[in-house]
Image (cartoon, grey):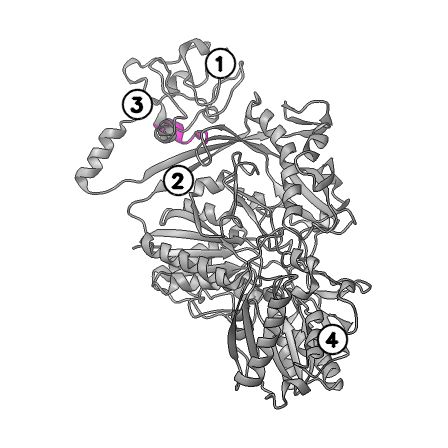
Amino acid sequence: MSITTETVKSHLKDPAIFCCQRKKGLVIGPADLEDPDLFEDMMEAGLLTLSEEGLTIEQVLGAVLITDCDALSPILPTMVDTVKQPVAEEKKKTPEKAEEKSQSKITGEKEDKVLRTLVKRYYKVTDVVTGDITSFENGVVTIDRKLMEEALQADPIVKEIKIDVIKPEERHIHTDTIMDVCPVAAKVEGSLGEGITNVLEGAVFMLTGVDEDGTQVHEFGSSEGFLDERMAFGNPGCADEEDIIIRVEAVVQRLTGMERRGPYAAHKCEDVIIQAVRNVLRKTTDVPVREELCKDVKKYDKPRVVLVKEIMGQGAMHDNILCPTEPCGVPGGQKNVDLGNVPLMLSPNEVRDGGIHALTCIGPATKEMTRHYFREPLVEALAEDKELDLIGVIFVGSPQVNDEKAFVSERLGAWIETMDIEGAVVTTEGFGNNHIDFTSHIEQIGKRDIPVVGVSFCAYQGQLVVGNKYADAMIEINKDKEGFENEIAGCSEICPKDAARAVQMLKNKMMGVEIKPASRKWSQEVIDNNNRLLGL
Amino acid sequence: MNLTVVEGMQSEIFVPVTPDPVWTPLTKPLNTCKVAFITAGGIHRKSQAPFDTSGDYSYRSIPSAISTSELMVTHGGFDNSDINKDVNAMFPLDRLHELVKEGFIGSLAKEMYGFMGGGGNVDKFRSETGPEIAEKLKVQGVDIVLCTGGCGTCHRSATIVTRCCEEKGMSCCVIAALPPIAKQQGAPRITAPHVPIGSNAGEPNNKEMQTAILKDTLRFMAEEAEHYGMCKVLPYEYRHNV
């Protein structure tokens, strides 16, 4: 979040802080410096301590750095070759939080309150190789070959593990069904949702699986085939076009591919390998290429809204790990099936910091993989919307028993009633039986006179099996021409345009603006037209 | 509240309506009826081609004389472990033979049918698969058709095929783990034991429960279900700790 040349003028007398690590010899420019508007939040989050000795921005611009310098630390006179235009009495500005707060009390207007701050630091990966030791240096990830043996020890159900590295131009190769795409993110400071997380940019892990008989595991359909044809590259849950893919191929015990223990074992073993990379990423001395500042903000004067995400909870692969110790990890997390699928609240930042490891389910195209949650478009859209106060993200599992579906949905309704919210968006991955509880969640919210928008894949193949009168503002996320679960991993998941339509439809409903009833059959035209109205 | 609005947006997903009633009254005593069991839960013979788990409207014939050890499941929509333990949890063929022996029902259809209703193509099931299965059962002189679904869209496919059979003049009941779907999709009769998806016909290896679910369903058809759309909740509960 460096400062721009345009805004630098208004910050000349503010403290000069490097936004990222910088090497000796650098001629300091605006792009190297952190935006002073963020200091208060960073100090509150414990990420930044200003120094009495620190120079101001006008004192360092154009100066040459004579020593390596860490991110988010003040630039001292001893670190530069020359101090430009010293302005003694204004050289630092300590944000005066306490005073501002008391002022807002007097006027009765409450200012936004930053509840927690997370900095995601992205490190560019230029290559991934295997070797004798795991390391991350100068953009190169080296994965210790011995990790494959170590990973096998994590669960006896996994009989074989292989790793290979697939460059973007090498994707026309066979892949078994794609179980998951998982980013590599390591906690450097703080706990889930706050502090600092280091993230690899340009490389992701991809887990595939078969059982000992060669049967594709864990899915309703399978994305096996040529990799370049089997993933919707660039979608939130998928590998991006330019990503290097680190593939982990697991072979699980015969007949366990469609039982809960089989897929879980494969994820556990993969995580042993990812953890080794996290451990070196945590300590990297490379310079991050960018930083993303995520804030959980309480916006007092804006309408409170909540995002409800229905996730699968029916055993087999239909399971998710919540709040693991490491971002997107496995150990330390709770499985929603074991928790009885009851609704749980995560803060938007906890979601964005890898609070969900998806064991991923349903069809390849309609499932939400781990990377999806790490950059969930609806979480981003609602959290960043200046007109809405996103109070949190509720995750509710979809049980396999009808009575339990009613139970979790009624508990959600009772909880919603106490939240004093003015709007809600309900999403689900997959289609079919989970639509029973998905539409029930919509009903539970709608019947309490709270405007609600539903988001799902339905189209042709997944058309709703049940419904009610509250499901009158719905967003279709299908991306397949024929409206089918097309077995392309991540094809019909929530994408940024879907999120934008959902947020707008919610605002319309909250403001009492009419939403025209759906046509009697799935029609892409309706979706295109809504996009057009939003200029998308 | 002051929010940006955009006029003219339209809801993108249609909410289903329940189709017209179909109804064939059951007029014969149970012990003279010929009974068929069909399932959308992906059951087939081990020697047959497995279903395409992403959506498949084909079906497999299952001779009622076959041993259940020759049957298996191919379905990607739920945890398969219960059926892997005991195929009667979805397709209770052994229990049906016992009911014939006991004299509770008259006889079994020689040929029954398995299909994989998950993600099922609604139009194909309605216009091809359903009518074909109904015709084949009718030709065998079947009076009663019982049906299990597996997952959610399976219940939809199961109900579509069941409606075809009812239209063809057989009395049908869906044994539903997900009764709201069977109801919304227009099942003529529904019984609903408290069972998870994947053991829709009762707990695996629990002969008493499986038998009771079948008997209660048949009694409901003969004695209670007087009109279209009735649903009876059965007092059998099984929790599958996956």
Of all residues, the one furthest to the right in this rendering is: B47
Q: Foreground: B212 or A124? A: B212
Are the two marked residues, 2 and 1, in contact with CB atoms closer than 8 angstroms? no
Mark 4 is on which residue type? Met
Residue at image x 22%, y 43%?
A109
Q: Foreground: B50 or A156? A: A156
Please give the residue where the numbered disc 1 appears in the rendered image.
Answer: A64
Residue A180 pos. (x, y %) = 63, 45
Find residue B51 and report its image quarter.
bottom right
Asked if residue A8 lies in the magenta stretch, the reply is yes
Alpha carbons under labels 4 and 1: distance apart: 84 Å
Mark 3 is on which residue type? Thr
- Range covered by the magenta-colored residues: A1-10
Residue A294 pos. (x, y %) = 44, 37
Asked if residue A391 lies in the magenta stretch, the reply is no
Of all residues, the one furthest to the bottom in this rendering is: B27
> Please, which chain is the residue tagged with disc 3 on?
A
Looking at the image, residue A298 sits to the left or right of residue A259; the answer is left
Residue A536 pos. (x, y %) = 51, 54
Give SS at disc 1: loop
Residue A468 pos. (x, y %) = 45, 70
Mark 2 is on which residue type? Asp
**Which label sits in the foreground, 1 or 3?**
3
Please give the residue where the numbered disc 2 appears in the rendered image.
Answer: A296
The circle drawn on residue A176 is none
Alpha carbons under labels 2 and 4: distance apart: 58 Å
Please give the residue where the numbered disc 4 appears in the rendered image.
Answer: B112
Query: Of label 1 and label 3, which has the lower sequence position?
Result: 1
The circle drawn on residue A94 is 3
